[in-house]
C-alpha cells in the first residue's frame, strides 16, 4: 500500500484517475464518509436519481444516520477494504480521506474510478443545467438555502445541494426537474487527489460572492492564496453569465475585474450598487425593507431572518432571481415563507426563562454577526454567548484578535478550550487565555473550560431568567444544548 510520503507534491497535483462516464453503465455508487453533511446529501441525490447507493463512515450518528436508514441505504461502520466488496461502479471519496485511507487506497490500487463529492455533483447532477453557485467566506449556506427556496416556491423545481438542512421540507438536496441547479460553493480543497477549491468544479453560469475574508488557515498559506482562489472562481463565469458581488466588501468588489461575465453589485454601504435595501425596520419576526434596483423601488419585502448579514444575503438572492426571470411578487412570496435552516439562529428550546439558540458560526466575523443578530432579535434580553472553536481553522492564533472583539454585544462569554490535535502546530494554536483576557478588558464577563460538561456549571452560575444562551459551534458541542435546557428546567 502506498503511503502519504509517496505523494511528495500532493498539495499541488490533481491525480489522474480512471474516467467516469455518467451516461455509461453505472448503477452501484459507494461513498466513503457517507455520514458527513455533504456526503449524506450526495447519497440522497444519487438515491433520488435511481442509483444503488451504499457507503461507510468511521461512526454513524443522527441525524444523517437516520436519514440514510430511512432511504434504506446500507452503511458500514468503520473503514476496511472488504467493505467495497462487491466492486462498485464508482467510488466517491470524502474530503477527510488521506492517500493512506484503507478504502480510498484499495480503490486506487485496484484502478477503480474515483470521484470527489464536487466532481460527482458536477458530472451527474449539474451537467448542462444552469448552475447557480453561491460562494464566499460567510453566508453561503443561508444564501443558497434562500435561493433554492425562492425558486421552489415559484414552481421552478430546481436541483440543489445545500450544506445544511432547510426547515422548509426538512431537506438539503433535490435532483429537480427544472433547468437550474443551485449549489453552495465551498472554497475548501476538494479531495486528497485534488487540491483545487470545490467551487471550481461547479460550472457556474451565475455566481454569487458574499464575502472574502481570510479563512481556512489550515490549507491557505496567506490572504494572497485565499484571494487567488476566488479570482479563479470569478474567471469561470461565461460572457453571458452573471457575477453577483457584495460591494460592501472591498475584496469582493475587486473580483469584478476578474470575470468575463456581466457584473451586478448589491450592498448597504454604497450608493452606487445595483441592488440595495431602504426603509429598513427590524423586529422579533425579522426585518422589512424596500428592495431597490437601479434606483427604483421594486417592492416591500418581509424577511423572517434577523441580522444585517441576512439582509445582505437576501439582496444577493433577489439579484439572481430577478436576472433569471422571477417576478418581484414571486420573490416576495418566497422570502415570506422561508423558515430558515437548522443550526442557523435555531431556537432549541426555552427553560427557566432562558431561550437556548444554536448556530453554526465558527469564524470571528460570523460570530460577531450572529451575536449582533441575536441582540437585534431579542433587544430586551441579555445575550450569553457560548462558543466552541472546533474547526481546524477556527482554532488558529491568527483569529485571536478577531475573537477578542467579536462578542462586544454579549453580556457574558464562555469559550470551550480546543484540544491540541495531531495536525496542530503550537506556534499557530490559539491561546484561549489571551482571548478571554482581552474580552474581559472590554468589560464583558468571560470564562473558559475544557468541553461541555466543564462549561455547564460556569454558564449556570451566570445565566439568569430573561437571557438568551447563544451556543455556537460547527459540531455537536458535546450535547451542551440539551444539557443546558435540562439543567435550566430543573433549577
Image (cartoon, grey):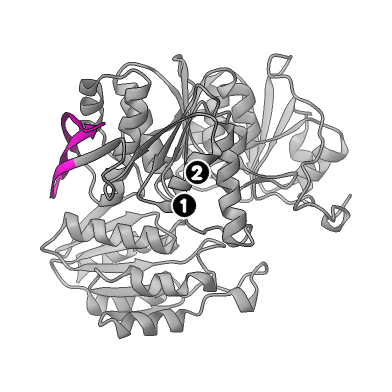
Residue 135's place in the image compared with 293, above or below, is: below
Where residue 22 appears, as percent x and y from the top left, is 68, 19
| Crowd around label 2: few <14 · some 14–19 · many ≥20 (10 Å) | many
Does residue 65 show up?
no
Where residue 167 appears, as percent x and y from the top left, is 32, 37
Where residue 43 appears, as percent x and y from the top left, is 57, 31
**Quarter of the image where one finds residue 221:** bottom right
**Quarter of the image where one finds residue 263:** top left
Is 211 in the magenta?
Answer: no
Q: Main secondary structure of the magenta part?
A: strand
Where does the C terminus fall, quadrant-wise? bottom left
Kindly state the secondary structure of the residue where label 2 is placed.
Answer: helix
**Quarter of the image where one finds residue 466:** bottom left
**Identity of the residue drawn at 67% across and 69% down:** 422
**Identity of the residue drawn at 86% across and 33% down:** 111
Viewer-proximal residue among 239 and 77? 239
Viewer-proximal residue among 448 and 60? 448
Write down the residue under mark 2: 255
Residue 291's place in the image compared with 372, above or below, is: above
Does residue 188 show up?
yes
Residue 43's place in the image compared with 270, above or below, is: above
Kindly state the secondary structure of the residue where label 1 is placed.
Answer: helix
Residues in magenta, as a range: 278-302
Write down the residue under mark 1: 251
Contact between labelled residues 2 and 1, with CB atoms less than 8 Å apart: yes
**Identity of the residue drawn at 32% across and 24% down:** 322
The total of numbered circles placed on residues is 2
Where residue 49 appears, as percent x and y from the top left, is 55, 19
Amino acid at each position: 500500500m502506498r503511503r502519504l510520503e509517496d505523494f511528495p507534491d500532493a498539495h499541488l497535483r490533481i491525480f489522474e484517475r480512471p474516467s467516469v462516464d455518467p451516461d455509461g453503465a453505472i448503477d452501484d455508487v459507494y461513498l466513503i464518509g457517507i455520514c458527513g453533511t455533504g456526503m449524506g446529501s450526495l447519497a440522497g441525490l444519487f438515491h433520488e436519481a435511481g442509483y444503488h447507493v451504499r457507503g461507510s463512515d468511521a461512526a454513524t450518528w443522527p441525524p444523517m444516520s437516520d436519514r440514510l436508514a430511512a432511504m434504506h441505504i446500507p452503511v458500514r461502520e468503520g473503514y476496511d477494504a472488504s467493505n467495497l466488496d462487491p466492486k462498485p461502479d464508482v467510488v466517491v471519496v470524502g474530503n477527510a480521506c488521506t492517500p493512506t485511507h484503507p478504502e480510498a487506497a484499495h480503490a486506487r490500487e485496484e484502478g477503480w474510478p474515483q470521484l470527489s463529492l464536487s466532481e460527482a455533483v458536477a458530472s451527474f447532477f449539474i451537467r448542462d443545467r444552469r448552475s447557480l453557485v453561491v460562494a464566499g467566506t460567510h453566508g453561503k449556506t443561508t444564501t443558497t438555502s434562500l435561493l433554492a427556496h425562492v425558486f421552489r416556491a415559484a414552481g421552478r423545481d430546481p436541483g440543489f445541494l445545500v450544506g445544511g438542512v432547510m426547515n422548509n421540507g426538512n431537506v438539503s438536496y433535490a435532483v429537480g426537474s427544472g433547468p437550474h441547479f443551485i449549489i453552495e460553493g465551498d472554497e475548501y480543497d476538494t479531495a486528497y487527489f485534488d487540491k483545487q477549491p470545490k467551487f471550481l468544479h461547479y460550472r457556474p453560469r451565475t455566481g454569487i460572492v458574499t464575502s472574502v475574508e481570510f479563512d481556512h488557515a489550515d490549507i491557505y498559506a496567506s490572504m494572497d492564496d485565499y484571494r487567488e482562489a476566488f479570482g479563479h472562481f470569478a474567471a469561470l463565469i461565461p460572457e453571458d453569465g452573471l457575477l453577483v458581488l457584495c460591494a460592501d466588501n472591498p475584496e469582493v468588489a475587486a473580483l469584478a475585474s476578474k470575470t468575463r461575465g456581466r457584473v451586478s453589485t448589491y450592498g448597504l454601504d454604497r450608493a452606487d450598487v445595483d441592488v440595495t435595501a431602504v426603509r429598513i425596520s427590524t423586529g422579533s419576526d425579522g426585518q422589512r425593507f424596500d428592495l431597490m434596483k437601479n434606483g427604483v423601488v421594486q417592492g416591500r419585502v418581509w424577511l423572517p431572518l434577523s441580522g444585517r448579514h441576512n439582509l445582505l444575503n437576501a439582496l444577493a438572492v433577489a439579484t439572481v432571481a430577478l436576472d433569471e426571470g422571477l417576478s418581484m411578487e414571486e420573490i416576495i412570496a418566497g422570502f415570506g415563507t422561508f423558515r430558515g435552516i437548522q443550526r442557523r439562529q435555531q431556537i432549541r428550546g426555552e427553560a427557566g426563562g432562558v431561550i437556548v439558540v444554536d448556530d453554526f458560526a465558527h469564524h470571528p466575523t460570523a460570530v460577531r454577526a450572529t451575536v449582533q443578530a441575536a441582540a437585534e432579535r431579542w433587544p430586551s434580553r441579555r445575550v450569553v454567548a457560548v462558543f466552541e472553536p472546533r474547526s481546524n481553522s477556527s482554532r488558529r492564533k491568527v483569529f485571536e484578535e478577531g475573537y477578542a472583539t467579536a462578542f462586544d454585544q454579549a453580556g457574558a462569554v464562555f469559550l470551550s478550550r480546543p484540544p491540541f490535535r495531531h495536525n496542530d502546530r503550537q506556534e499557530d494554536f490559539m491561546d484561549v487565555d489571551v482571548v478571554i483576557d482581552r474580552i474581559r478588558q472590554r468589560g464583558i464577563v468571560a470564562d473558559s473550560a475544557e468541553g461541555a460538561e466543564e462549561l455547564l456549571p460556569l454558564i449556570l452560575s451566570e445565566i439568569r431568567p430573561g437571557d438568551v444562551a447563544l451556543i455556537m459551534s460547527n459540531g455537536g458541542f458535546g450535547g451542551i444544548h440539551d444539557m443546558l435546557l435540562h439543567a435550566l428546567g430543573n433549577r
